[in-house]
Image (spheres, rainbow, N blue to C red):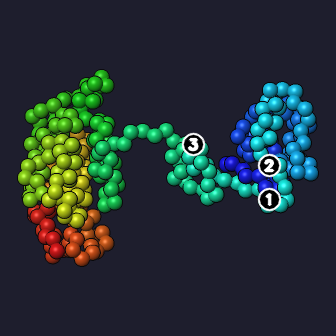
């Protein structure tokens, strides 16, 4: 916080930031109160008298610098009102009101924007699905290729198709099991299953998708639900020794999508309709628009 000096009766001489030097206790150290003859609990008004700054002769570089700084500042006066405190809102700016956004942006270390962030975090997402999708985007799920790289002895073959080595790219974008699930939901929005998360982003940016209200959210939600269900099925086969058919996974994806979309507020006129009458259970993406 920064302090604008008024009458100097509220701001601490040693601990508040009321000069460009910052809190003076950090400049002078513990010997400061004795050197300047101003007690540690004093307010700024203790350093002024009759409208003028009152400090002893400078005996150090710090004291000399302080006197130079004070020569550019008006001494405290009752006519100037009470002291005012300001909140930092940037590197060199302060405001009267506290802003959590400005404070967070100031203290954090900014990182480059992630191009795929909106594929993971959006208003309609399902938390458990978005978390697994986020881990998949970062290649942090413990797929078998990663387990082997850690020195673990596990069979490398994919638990879903038993044909190819298991990896993020294979499990979620090239496994025959994945292709069968995605093909079921292919419609006018996309004709073939996405081959990567980047291709999903490309689909959501196409003109016929952007022009339809809600279409982007449906595709992003679908990719998350599919990834989540495939990952869960993979884990069930490894740890529970149970398996589900492709039709069962498709039904589970369909159910999750329907439940989430039907829980959303009613759309405004001219936007995508999520009503039961226009939400087929077989071709999820063949939605009607009103």
Mark 2 or 3, nearer chain start = 2
Quickly name the residue at label 1.
80
Dot 2 lies on which element?
A: loop
Instruction: Decide if residue 52 is on the left or right side of residue 190.
Output: right
Residue 148, percent across and down? Answer: 26, 26
Closer-to-camera residue (274/31): 31
Q: Residue at x 86, y 41 (%)?
A: 40
| Nearer the camera: disc 2 or disc 3 | 2
Quickly name the residue at label 3.
91
Residue 237, percent across and down? Answer: 20, 43
Residue 127, percent across and down? Answer: 35, 55
Q: Residue at x 21, y 44 (%)?
A: 197
Quickly name the residue at label 2.
74
Task: Give me the disc on residue 56.
Answer: none
Residue 280, percent across and down? Answer: 12, 68
Instruction: Decide if residue 77 is on the left or right side of residue 229.
Output: right
Whether residue 159 is visible, yes or no, is: no
């Amino acid at each position: 916080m920064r302090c604008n000096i008024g009458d100097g009766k509220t701001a601490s001489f040693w601990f508040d930031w009321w000069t460009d030097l910052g809190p003076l206790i950090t400049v002078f150290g513990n010997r400061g109160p004795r050197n300047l003859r101003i007690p540690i609990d004093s307010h700024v008004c203790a350093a002024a008298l009759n409208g003028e700054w009152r400090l002893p002769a400078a005996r150090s570089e710090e004291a000399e610098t302080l006197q130079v700084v004070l020569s550019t500042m008006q001494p405290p006066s009752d006519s100037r009102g009470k002291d005012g405190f300001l909140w930092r809102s940037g590197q060199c700016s302060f405001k009267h009101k506290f802003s959590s956004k400005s404070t967070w942006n100031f203290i954090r270390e900014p990182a480059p924007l992630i191009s795929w962030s909106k594929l993971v975090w959006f208003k309609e997402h399902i938390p458990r699905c978005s978390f697994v999708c986020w881990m998949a985007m970062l290649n942090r799920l413990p797929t078998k290729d990663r387990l082997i790289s850690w020195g673990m002895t596990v069979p490398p073959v994919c638990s879903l198709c038993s044909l190819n080595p298991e990896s993020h790219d294979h499990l979620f974008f090239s496994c025959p099991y994945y292709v069968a699930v995605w093909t079921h939901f292919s419609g006018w929005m996309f004709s073939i299953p996405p081959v990567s998360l980047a291709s999903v982003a490309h689909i959501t940016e196409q003109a016929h998708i952007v022009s339809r209200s809600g279409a982007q959210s449906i595709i992003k939600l679908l990719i998350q639900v599919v990834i989540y269900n495939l990952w869960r099925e993979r884990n069930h086969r490894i740890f529970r020794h149970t398996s589900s058919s492709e039709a069962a996974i498709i039904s589970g994806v369909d159910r999750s999508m329907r439940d989430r979309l039907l829980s959303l507020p009613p759309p405004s006129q001219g936007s995508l309709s999520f009503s039961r009458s226009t939400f087929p259970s077989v071709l999820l993406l063949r939605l009607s628009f009103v």
